[in-house]
Image (tube, rainbow, N blue to C red):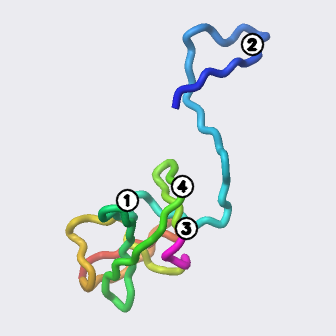
Amino acid sequence: MLAEVDLPNPGHELYPGMYADVVIELVRHEDALKLPTAAVGVSGDASFVYIVREGRLAKVPVTTGFTNEGSVEIVSGLVGDEAVVAAVTPALSEGEAVRAVSSESPPEKLATAQ
């Protein structure tokens, strides 16, 4: 969205034609569960993630909220302690045997095919 803003410029450091990229935070959800956008798949109008349950992939429908800077807020569908596959790809299928491995940044989890 383009917007024009008038700013005080007493030091004459800003010149006509200059521009800036700005992020305006409207709402912050401190306790929100966030996943990388690559971890969330879309099928039609529905979003989903794959989790590792008892050594197999399970496709779980989720409701998403805000998306920002490579992350997406998960509003419902997960409680936060699931092992979530970090990237949804066409090669994944529900029921496939996998082994979960930890990543460096919780709550994101990785899964590898066995």
Label 3 sits on residue: 75
Q: Which of the image's four quarters has the C terminus?
A: bottom left
* Foreground disc of the pair 1, 3: 3
Q: Disc 3 residue type? A: Val
Q: Nearer the viewer, mark 4 or mark 1?
A: 4
* Horizontal and vertical percent position of residue 60: 39, 77
Distance Cα–Cα, label 4 vs label 3: 9 Å
Q: Residue at x 75, y 13 (%)?
A: 9
Residue that mark 2 sits on:
9
Front-lying residue, 65 or 102:
65
- Range covered by the magenta-colored residues: 76-80
* Gap in angstroms between the C-alphas marked 2 and 4: 34 Å
Against 61, residue 9 (above or below) is above
Q: Which tag, 1 or 3, sits closer to the chain's start?
A: 1
**Numbered tag placed on residue 66 in the rendering:** 4
* Residue annotated with mark 1: 38
Residue type for callout 1: Ala
